[in-house]
Amino acid sequence: MQFCGDYHTHSRYSDGRQSVMEIVKAASSRGLSEIAITDHGPLAAVIGVKSAEQYLSIREEIEVLKVLYPDINILLGAEANIRDLHGTLDIPDTILQQLDVVIAGLHPYTLPTSLQDGRDIFLQNSLRHLGRKQRQAAIAANTRATVQAISSHPELDIISHPGLFFEVDIEEVARACIKYQVLFEINCGHEHPKVSDIMKAQRLGVSFIINSDSHFQSTVGDLQYGSSMVQKLAIDESLVVNRKGGGGWSHWAKKSRLCIF
Ligand SMILES: [Zn+2]
Ligand SMILES: [Zn+2]
């Protein structure tokens, strides 16, 4: 299948190995009409932006690039880290509201809101190999944190790589995505979720977005894994919001709806 945009990429502002300009150039040369720069939130050790204010500098860079590359719609986004069981994100609302695309996900080495949250999610997960009970407790905590992030952030557009790093109950997350109109990501960089989990989400009726999660110029717009899943599972292409001809960002982003009304 063909795509109009890739809405999950990382630049050197976080842990990507490419400049914002290189991402735009790569996207443009692959024929995409839209690209989002979505660097990691600040509170994941090593991989995050230095501070949430950094997104405002990226915005300035994007404004210049828009003049140089008028044929591609360049969007500013972020991949925020979920920090606790309440679904708190590591980017303040005042900044979230200025982004075009808001992604959230669970990532290792995120600074938890409190010691209790550190124990409930991040320590629990590191102990999950100890036994079934521990694993189930970890899945319950990860699912709760993810569902809370979905239900408590009206700006949220996408849940990134559901279940990667931190196992979740895919069906519960999928149901929350449907209820709050959040897109369920098929992440090509990590080739995640696996087929059986995509099938579960498909059966429940989620809307999918297929992204690269690119950290290198060579993978910007590489959406092959998602494309092969669509084919393999006979997913109705109309359920993939970034299909070519589907209208792009302005048809699914919460921010764009706020602009219209
Ligand atoms: Zn991620
Ligand atoms: Zn990412």
Image (cartoon, grey):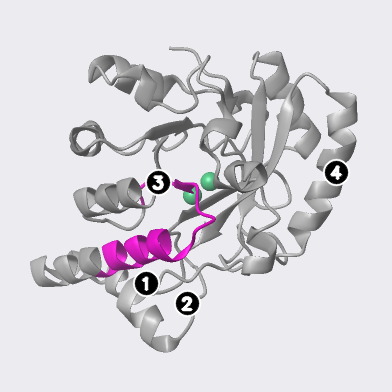
Q: CA distance from mark 3 to mark 2?
A: 26 Å
Q: Is residue 242 left or right of residue 185?
A: right
Q: CA distance from mark 3 to mark 1?
A: 27 Å
Q: Residue furthest bottom?
A: 115
Secondary structure beneath disc 3? Answer: loop
Secondary structure beneath disc 1? Answer: helix
Considering only order in the chain, which callout, 1 or 3, is on the residue closer to the N terminus?
1
What's the mark number on residue 122? Answer: 1
Is residue 166 in view?
yes
The residue carrying mark 2 has its beta carbon less than 8 Å from ligand 1 = no
Q: Which span is picked out in magenta?
A: 141-164
What's the mark number on residue 48? Answer: none
Q: Is residue 78 left or right of residue 51?
A: left
Q: Are there few (<14), some (14-19), or many (20+) residues within 10 Å of tag 2?
A: many
Residue type (three-letter) at the residue carrying disc 2: Pro
What's the mark number on residue 181? Answer: 3
Q: Residue at x 52, y 67 (%)?
A: 89
Circle 4 or circle 1, nearest the eye? 4
Q: CA distance from mark 4 to mark 1?
A: 35 Å
- Labels 4 and 1 touching (C-beta < 8 A): no
